[in-house]
Image (cartoon, rainbow, N blue to C red):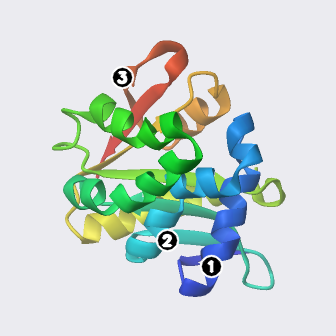
Amino acid sequence: MAIRQLQPKDKENCRTVCHQTATAPKYIKSKDLVCLLYCDYYVDNEADNCFVVTDEDDNAIGYILCAENPKKFDKGVKPYLKKARKIDFFDGLMPILESVAFKGLCKKYPAHLHIDILPVGQGQGHGSKLLKALEEHLRAKGVKGVRLGVGGDNTGAHRFYERNGFVLLKNLGGMGRIYGKQL
């Protein structure tokens, strides 16, 4: 298995990873909904800020997707959210609500990320390697920090990010936690 920059050929595999790692019933039911919210914008518009872990046949089995500039993201994600709202109105608003939760953090932590790995690639250090690749990439571009949201009940992810140097920025209780790391 290897870590490399996202390539155009990886889009469908990334969509599959996004869908197969989703836990919310509505995301499990609708691949298009979860991918519109958490995958497609990044793959289509931020490929230079995205990395994948691949299997022995060079197929993506995991990814780290990142938007480095909040203003560019807010503008560029709108068409994806419009499509998502046609599938599920409330979930199509979620990234907008997340932007509110992140308000005030963007100056210190402008980039944000999503990371998912299929079970076949989990527990082998690939998540940490993906984080390291992204962090080195963002530092080289002069990005000051990166942030992410994690579900409130996802204690394994909380430990993972803390082990990788992320600090808790906001605890939203059962709604989730926001972590950040200065680069």
- Foreground: 141 or 62? 62
Asked whether residue 182 appears in the rendered view, the answer is yes
Identify the mark nearer the N-term, 1 or 3: 1
Element at badge 3? Answer: strand
Disc marking residue 126: none
Residue 156 vs 33, above or below: the answer is above
* Residue type at the position of mark 3: Lys
Which residue is found at the position 34% from the left and 43% from the top?
181
Q: Quadrant of residue 52?
A: bottom right
* Residue 145 percent coordinates (x, y): 27, 49
In the displayed image of the protein, which residue is found farthest to the right? 120
Q: CA distance from mark 2 to mark 1?
A: 8 Å
Q: Which residue is found at the position 56% from the left and 53% from the top?
A: 115
**What amino acid type should be assigned to the residue bearing mark 2?**
Val
Residue at (55, 85) in percent of width and height: 8
**Dot 2 corresponds to which residue?**
43
User: Mark 1 belongs to which amino acid?
Assistant: Asp
Q: Are marks 2 and 1 in contact (CB under 8 Å)?
A: yes
Q: Nearer the viewer, mark 1 or mark 3?
A: 1
Image location (x, y in percent) of residue 10: 62, 79
3D distance between C-alphas at marks 3 and 2: 27 Å
Say if 142 sits above or below 164 in the image: below
On the image, numbered disc 3 is attached to which residue? 170
Q: Residues within 10 Å of mark 2 (few under 14, many from 20)?
A: many
Q: Which residue is mark 1?
A: 10
Give the camera-side residue of 172 and 120: 172
Q: Earlier in the sequence, mark 3 or mark 2?
A: 2
Quarter of the picture holding the N terminus: bottom right
Mark 1 crowd level (few <14, some 14–19, many ≥20, 10 Å Cα): many
Identify the element where label 1 is drawn: helix
Nearer to me, 76 or 101: 76
